[in-house]
Structure formats: C-alpha cells, structure tokens
Image: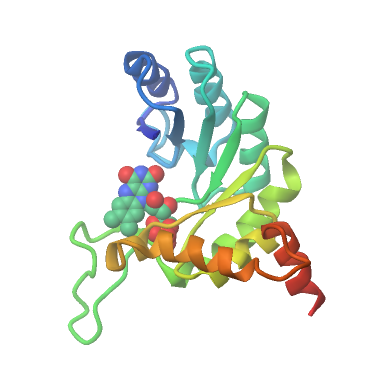
Amino acid sequence: MIISVGAHRPNGYAPVVRDLGTAGDAFELNVSCPNLDRDGTDIGSDPDAIEAAVAAVRLETDKPLIVKLPVLASSIAECAQAAQAAGADAVCVANSIPALPLEAYTRAPAIGNVIGGLSGPSIRPIVLRLVWLAARSVDIPVIACGGIETADDALDYFSVGASAVQVGTASFARPFAMVEIVRTLQQCCTDDRVTGIRDLIDLWRAQ
Ligand SMILES: Cc1cc2nc3c(=O)[nH]c(=O)nc-3n(C[C@H](O)[C@H](O)[C@H](O)COP(=O)(O)O)c2cc1C
C-alpha cells in the first residue's frame, strides 16, 4: 500500500509521515499543492521547497519515497534532481494540469470548482515530454502518469524512459483498466525474443 501525502507547506509532510507510524509500505509525496508559506505556487515547482520537504520526510522513514511532481514546473529536470538529492527513491511525473475547461456551446465550466486539474488522454503528449526530460536527468526510477488508457500508451511511456506507470482517469470509466493493461502487456511478451517490457520496447523500436 502506497500512502499519498499532501501538504500546503514544505514542512507539512514530515509530521504526517511521522503520525502514520508503521502504516503503509511506501509514501508518495504529492508536492503539487499550493505553497501557503510563499506565493501559492506549487511546492513541487520549486526545487528548494521539494528538497526541504523530502529531506524532512527522509528523516522520518526508511520506506520507499516517491515524489509526485507537477506539470507546470519551470524545469522538471531540476525538480526531479532536487527530489533525488534529498533522498527520494523515485519520482512520479506527473499530476494533472491546472486548467479551466469549458463545456461546448453553454461555455459553462466543465469542472465543478471552475478551475481544477485536467487529466486523461489530452495531457499524454505533454507528460511524455516531461517523463523523457526527467528520465534523462536522474538515476532514480521515473513513474509515468498522464492519460494512460491502453497497454500501447504505457509502452509509449516506457519507451521514453519510464520504469513504471500509474493509471488515473481511465480507471474511473473502466475500473479494471489497470488489469487489462497489465494483461495486454503480458500478452505482448509472448515472442521468443521478449522476456519483459524492456525487450518489448527494443523490438518495437526496431520495427
Ligand atoms: C478526480 C481526480 C482526483 C485526483 N486526486 C489526486 C490526489 O488526491 N492526489 C494526487 O496526487 N493526484 C490526484 N489526481 C491526479 C492523478 O493521480 C493523475 O496524476 C492525473 O490525473 C494524470 O493521470 P491520468 O490522466 O491517468 O488521470 C487526481 C485526478 C483526478 C482525475
């Protein structure tokens, strides 16, 4: 069980992890929250704030620590590097994109809160670029998240350097989307030359 921890201040994560005690197998720090100590921008778009948050949590736990980065960071590479430097075991790229989508014709806000996080297939090319940039800048694994609906989408992310993927929005429409994706990836690995995802990507690239 991976526990997602959110906070509105860089020093807000460590007390939560401390209070959680032995609960969970790993933590994912959602640093895509507004930083109330500063100007309300995402904590995760500021490498110094990421480093402070992760370093404080690292002192509280030896469990695997994933840092979930925002899309709107000026440099995803610097943010991922800050997480790595402070002791993160992996980064997740990325959260949803702050947006104000409107309904067709009525122009009513499509999100109940008017502004909110845009997710799903439309964000995939944007997040693919970020995963590619992040994977080139750190040694720790990059977990990709953004618009994955099929095994093919997952392979896209693996091909740009992701080590694992997360499925969000697709799970709302198809609760078994993740199971389908895993099964399809396993079926893809039936070729003699293929023993795993890395082989599959190499084969796919060679075609
Ligand atoms: C309804 C909804 C609620 C979400 N809540 C959270 C959350 O509490 N914490 C978090 O880190 N990400 C949250 N996300 C972001 C997703 O985990 C994911 O990063 C993002 O939606 C992109 O992936 P996707 O296109 O597969 O959904 C939420 C997304 C949606 C659509």
Relative to residue 207, is residue 143 depicted above or below?
Answer: above
Residue 73 percent location from the top left of the image: 55, 48
Residue 117 appears in which quarter of the rendering?
Answer: bottom left
Residue at coordinates 73% horizontally, 64% vertically from top-left? Answer: 194
- Percent x, y for residue 167? 43, 57
- The structure's colour scheme is rainbow
Residue that appears at 44% across and 25% down = 10
Residue at x 50% of width, y 60% of height: 182
Q: Is residue 20 above or below residue 33?
A: above
Front residue of 20/192: it is 192
Q: Which quarter of the image is occupied by the C terminus?
A: bottom right
> In the rendered view, would you say 114 is above or below 42?
below
Q: Residue furthest right?
A: 206
Instruction: Point out the image quarter for the N terminus.
Output: top left
In-image side of 145 versus 174 (left or right): right
Q: Is residue 11 left or right of residue 140?
A: left
Please state the horizontal and vertical placement of residue 102, each as a whole percent of the image.
Answer: 27, 74
Does residue 125 appear in this view?
A: no
Q: Residue at x 33, y 18 (%)?
A: 20
| 202 horizontally vs 173: left or right | right
Number of numbered discs: 0
As displayed, is residue 96 above or below residue 14?
below
Residue 24 visible in rendering: yes
Furthest toward the bottom, the residue is 105
Between 168 and 203, the one lying in front of the other is 203
Residue 44 in the image: state x and y as whole percent: 50, 39
